[in-house]
Amino acid sequence: MQNSIATSSNRKLAPKYMPIVFAFYMSLIMAFLMSLIIVAANSGIADHYFQQVLHAYRIAMPSAFVCILIVRPLVMRLVKITVNN
């Protein structure tokens, strides 16, 4: 009889997807933070601030995701060169 409650380990992705998942989470967080900062710097924090942030975020998040996927291998190489194992 199989347990009907799925454990969290059954829902995890395979390790081969780690670069993509990393890029997704990193772009999700960083694009939002940068959207908050850039909109505040350019327009100030006034009426419709969060609408402007969300508009910027719709552009920034997919762009950041693609950029992180492209740049990640270079960054990993630079970290290997810089950090002593």
Image (tube, rainbow, N blue to C red):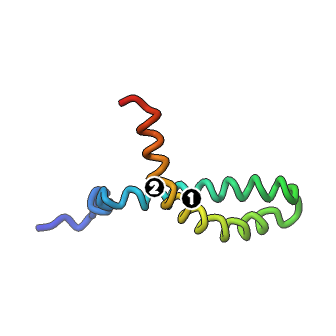
Q: CA distance from mark 2 to mark 1?
A: 8 Å
Q: Amino acid at mark 2?
A: Phe
**Dot 2 lies on which element?**
helix
From the viewer's side, name the closer residue of 1 and 26.
26
79 displayed left or right of 55: left
Q: Identify the residue shown where x is 71% and y is 59%.
A: 35
Q: Identify the residue shown where x is 75% and y is 52%.
A: 37
Picture quadrant of residue 27: bottom right
40 displayed left or right of 84: right
Q: For mark 2, what is the residue?
A: 22
From the viewer's side, name the closer residue of 78 and 3.
78
Earlier residue among tags 2 and 1: 2
Disc on res. 15: none
In what quadrant of the picture does the C terminus appear?
top left
80 displayed left or right of 61: left
Picture quadrant of residue 5: bottom left
Q: Identify the residue shown where x is 15% and y is 67%.
A: 2
In what quadrant of the picture does the N terminus appear?
bottom left
Where's residue 78, x and y in %?
Answer: 47, 42
Q: Residues within 10 Å of mark 2 (few under 14, many from 20)?
A: some
Q: Amino acid at mark 1?
A: Ser
Where's residue 73, x and y in %?
Answer: 44, 53
Q: How many marks?
A: 2
Q: Residue furthest left?
A: 1
Where's residue 48, x and y in %?
Answer: 84, 66
Where's residue 54, x and y in %?
Answer: 71, 67
Q: For mark 1, what is the residue?
A: 27
**Dot 1 lies on which element?**
helix
